[in-house]
Image: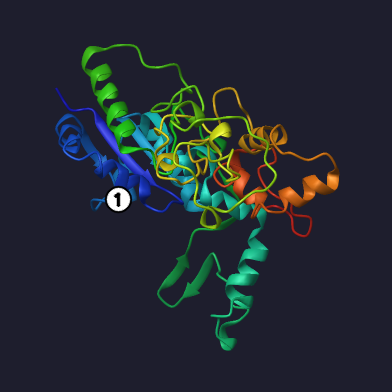
Amino acid sequence: MAKPKLALYWASSCGGCEITVVDIEEKILDVADFFDIVFWPCIMDFKYEDVEAMEDGSITISLFNGAIRNSENEYMAKLMRQKSQLLIAFGSCAQEGCIPGLANFYDRKSTFDYVYNECPSVEEKSKGIFPQWETEMPEGKITIPEYWDTVKTLDQIVDVDYYIPGCPPQSLQVAAVIGAVIEILQTGADLPPKGAVLGATDKSCCDECPRERKEKKIKEFFRPHEIIPNDDECLLDQGILCMGPATRGGCGALCVQANIPCRGCYGAPENVKDQGVKMISALSSVIDASTPEEVKKIINKIADPIGTFYRFSLAASTFKRVQNLDEEIVK
């Protein structure tokens, strides 16, 4: 029998999801033995034409990582959906927008104005020269992907079957998911319900954290370099902003165990629609203040609160982006 076909693609991403796949160590041999890897441009020399020539639905599983930042990302998302039986949003960028999604605090115009006009590294003679999506040359027309005003998640563009969270997903969870998929394909067992989050738990990161929570009231926030925390006490209780209460479990609380607060990369816990709102709600119950002035003083110690609360989930949040009043949103 022909092997099941596996594809992996990256859109707007850093490459960390590719690394975590390779980081499953010797289990990568099981993947190569069981699957026919038909598309993985980060690792092997595949072309878009190779995918376009495939029959619709001929790819058994596609792991799609990266946010949708431009027209090329959109095209590939739709192409991979068309060619795949199962399309999995692999990693935080595809699921929530992640770090690329922070660009939604701005728009295309303001981004280009800074990069091509205001940035100190731009030479004077080059200022004001912006990318053009089409350029006529003697040899013919040159095109580049159109840069969007808004970063989007994969499921805002196409239908997604499953999600594997994390920035990047933990390799042990990736190995477990791949192992489960192989078993399902071998035995014909039922697939998880569509839309399920794989390689994670239904609880929060705090449920996996070994530190002791005493529900202390917070009078001051500290950045990680400003305090040496106690090893066995909840970081949030010590005034270090930890996103654990608003983050899905499954990573094993590895950052917290290394004295680094949870950043929130596994996304919101089960039944939580907005990670930032969940974190703000959690903080409102532990801040020790009796007047608005005291609250403001304590909150002002949080560096970039909105960027912190929505570091990974802005594009998937309730408001998705800062609204642009100066230019029509093109995408």
Report if residue 131 is visible in the image. yes
At a point 78% along the width and 45% down the height, the residue shown is: 295
The image shows residue 328 at horizontal and vertical percentages of: 74, 55
The image shows residue 37 at horizontal and vertical percentages of: 23, 38
Amino acid under disc 1 = Pro
Query: Which one is in front, 207 or 164?
Result: 207
Report if residue 331 is visible in the image. no
Left or right relative to 63: residue 214: right
Residue named by callout 1: 41
From this view, report whether residue 269 is shown above or below residue 18: above
From this view, report whether residue 208 is shown above or below residue 47: above
Q: Residue furthest bottom?
A: 125
The quarter of the picture where residue 291 lies is: top right
Q: Residues within 10 Å of mark 1 (few under 14, many from 20)?
A: some
Image quadrant containing the N terminus: top left
Left or right relative to 69: residue 298: right
